[in-house]
Amino acid sequence: MKNVAITGLGMITPLGKGVDATWQNVINGRSGIGPITRFDATDYPVRIAGEVKDFDPRDYIDGKEVKKMDTFIQYAIASVAEALADAGVDFASMPDSMKDRFGVMVGTGIGGLPEIEKTAQTLRERGPKRISPFFIPSVLANLASGQVSIHFGLRGPHGCPVTACATGSTAIGDAARIIERGDADLMVAGGTESTITGLCVAGFAAAKALSRRNDEPEKASRPFDNDRDGFVMGEGCGVMVLESLESAKARGARIYAMLEGYGMSGDAYHITAPPEGGPGAVVCMRLALKDAGVDLTEVGYINAHATSTMADTIETQAIRTIFGGHADRLVVSSTKSMTGHLLGAAGGIEAIFAVKALETGIIPPTINLDNPDPACDLFYAPNVAVKRDIICSLSNSFGFGGVNGSLVFTKDGS
């Protein structure tokens, strides 16, 4: 089995366009949450979200092609462009045979909901003859990977996992497996999402999943806090270039970290809520750590799934079950306190944060942790980033349907 290196990173988030802009805002504890501008939310019980700002798809995509893609696809192409450039992949001098060994695995939790909502209205108001021939390919979940493959000429393995809010982690883990078994030399992998629409916000609000702290948007996402009242929707994309260690060394590529472990599990319990104690999360983390072959005491940081709901307590319980006494020496944080919850893209951006923590020795904070829930009793880096040299980090992602995914990263050479 081949070792998997991380050689490139790319993202677009409510905190900025690109990895550097987002990372600086994350480690400085800034919030990307604000009033919704994508639609008139005046009469909605929830009027806040983490929107991507100042994004022009024509900076990355030909104007004629933009209309064929819903926003989640546009975010994917933009983020992949950054990740491939960061990895130093030179397509101009690359023989076609190499592109057969370069693949893409970019998933989404929901897909093209904005265009579906818009086109349904067009159908009602103007009839079937006014529907665009590009409607279907602009909304299909797998067209994020498909358009990335077409745009960059990646002819290797190609897929699109859809595992709700675990999608980004699943895509990265599945892509790593493809490299490990020798079916590709390089995979671009992660998650993308853009569903801040009236229908989606109303749906999550009806399920009582969203924070209604409309008058204090920057304080609305508050994982592990006793006053949390639901998550805040976000949008964006996070992808990384995964490469066999052999290929990365042959190219002389910079290696951010190694992806050593991947675990998946199912709760088999409820469509939206995990069971008390988080047995599914326990299994998932245990599998990832076993796959990585690391000792529990080597893990220094966990980027928690924690969404600012009551389930934060259950993730805490699961971490304590896995790590025992070492749990008190961990730094655990939820970057969703700043980005909001990017749904299918969450695992992608949070995996990048876990890698950046290894690279920089800076662990992002959990902001808005002003009144800790007594049942959440770990060290969550409240409100201020922590400087700590770590050799191993873990990223958790859990989704509706009881799907769980965990990734384990180590410093190159550790």
Image: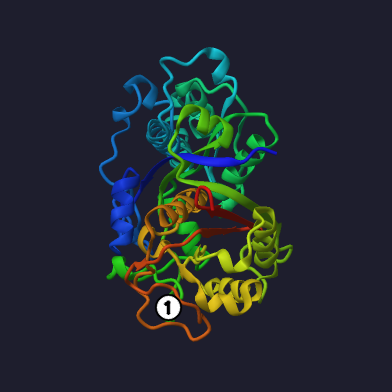
Image spot of residue 201 (x, y percent): 44, 56
Name the foreground residue: 286 vs 317.
286
Residue under label 1: 225
Name the image quarter holding residue 363: bottom left
* The one of 184 and 26 positioned closer to us in this rendering: 184
Task: Mark yes or no: residue 402 visible.
Answer: no
* Residue 221 vertical position relative to residue 292 in the rendered view, above or below: below
Horizontal side, residue 227 vs residue 204: left or right? left
Kind of residue at disc 1: Asp
Q: Is residue 360 above or below residue 85?
A: below
Residue for point 29% across, 54% down:
24
**On screen, residue 180 above or below 229:** above
> Local crowd at mark 1 within 10 Å, few (<14), some, or many (≥20)?
many
The colour style of the image is: rainbow
The percent coordinates of residue 340 (x first, y second) are 40, 59
- Tell me what residue is drawn at x 44 percent, y 55 percent: 358
Determine whether, in the image, residue 157 is placed left or right of residue 221.
Answer: right
User: Percent x, y for residue 278?
Assistant: 65, 71
Work out whether residue 369 or residue 263 is closer to the camera in this orientation and state it: 263
